[in-house]
Image (spheres, rainbow, N blue to C red):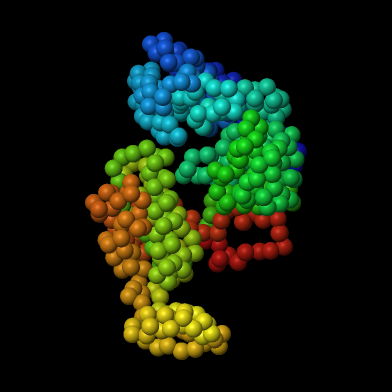
Amino acid sequence: MKQIISKISKNSIPSDRLQKSKKEIADTIYQLVEKEIRKYSEVIKLEFGGSYAKGTWLSKNADIDIFIKFKKNISEEKLESISKEIGFTSLKKYSPYVRYSQHPYVEARIKDTKINIVPCYDVKIGEWKSAADRSPYHTKFMKKSLTPKMRSEVRVLKTFLQSNGIYGAEIAKQGFSGYISEVLILQYGSFEKLVKSISKIKENQVIGKTSNQFDTTIVVIDPIDDKRNLAAAISNENIVKLILICRSLKAKPSLKFFKTKTLKKSNKFWKNLLIVKFEFKTRSPDIIWGQIKRATTSLSKQLELEGFSVLRSKSYTDEQKEAYLMFFLESTQISEIYQKKGPEIFRDDSTKSFITKNLKNTELMWIGNDLKIIALEKRKHTEAISFMNEFLQKNLNVGIPKGLQGDFKQGFKVFVGNKNLRKSIKEEASELISVDGTLLPVSYTHLTLPTKRIV
């Protein structure tokens, strides 16, 4: 494994030419923002943050974060309005736009570099007024704590996470952030030790020190705030993927774990894929992703309540105007009848109530072997398309977040399969009916997945 790590480490270090170019961009933007903040007495100073400031950035995704530190007595409204004015004015040559976290911030792109102008309060450690207030402390802590060797190990870990599709803190991904990557390397000392430790990690295991209790699959404590669990923002799916690929890498080290995988696809399960498509008015990517994820979760529950078995689901948006809610169903058609179980016959009042409520409309009623009364009911909908169309027409306020209801009122489409999907959307949808890439190189090498099952 050491040879593999050494090779990845060398390849992940940005070239001298790229480092020079990145520094020129960072210095240019810093000067532009610095010029603007002189107009505002509410602002104390500027600081670089993120992976650029800490020397852990990768060639392919090196954002430059500049934090505007405000006096702590400034209102949130003023912090937001002034920071947006500073961001838009200083980045006016680069087509700036607003992104959202707890507070809005201004973003732009210069060549392949994303620039973030982020507001925060100048507060003492532990006296946080906003989530961004921790970031300058993260930068200082990591600059002081990470050795040059550790910075190289962080780059290896980031490459590993990226290659396996679990890197990125944005809500669309819910993966491992750059900061968590730094925390993990600092905790374990090296990438190899991290792999070995994560391979045998236990459920609810705490990485770091805290006196607090957290209810997540694993717990990763923020070194500058022991009340904060960094793993809370990571999806369970991505945590499990990390564990699996660490086990696989430990069992059989290979460079393939640091390369993006291409899956074989088939058309076998497209007929089981229910898709809801709609268009939305332009808004921040962070907002639309949050809305469609909530809508997908809500509609999954409604499908289950109606009797459709949802095996997997996902959301996707082009972040411009189209969004898709996708559901992989056991079947898009279900039986016209189903059994509704009532109480045990020894529960007198409950039994009378169940019979009274259901006898008139039931097809049949009988006592089951478990001494519970069973009513045979007839479903209104047996096809997923008809159910979803009617539900969205009549129950928007139940199944769709308020922020999306206006978009749905403008129209939506419900269909099964891939005939109405362009190539890029088809690629996204096909993930629902493909073997997860993290399962293919499993360490259980004696097992062979049948070719017909790999889609």
Residue 58 seen in this snapshot: yes
Along the line of sight, the residue nearer the viewer: 164 or 104: 104
Q: Residue furthest front?
A: 349
Q: Quadrant of the N terminus?
A: top right
Q: Is residue 17 left or right of residue 29?
A: right
Q: Position of residue 375 (x, y in %)?
A: 43, 83
Q: Position of residue 198 (x, y in %)?
A: 70, 46
**Point 45% across, 34% down: residue:** 102
**Point 54% across, 22% down: residue:** 123
Q: Position of residue 241 (x, y in %)?
A: 61, 51
**Point 39% across, 53% down: residue:** 295
Q: Is residue 83 left or right of residue 396?
A: right
Along the line of sight, the residue nearer the viewer: 37 or 10: 37
**Point 40% across, 59% down: residue:** 299
Along the line of sight, the residue nearer the viewer: 167 or 204: 204
Q: Residue furthest left?
A: 410
Residue 421 seen in this snapshot: no
Q: Position of residue 254 (x, y in %)?
A: 69, 46
Along the line of sight, the residue nearer the viewer: 268 or 365: 365
Residue 426 location, quadrant:
bottom left
Q: Is residue 438 left or right of residue 193?
A: left
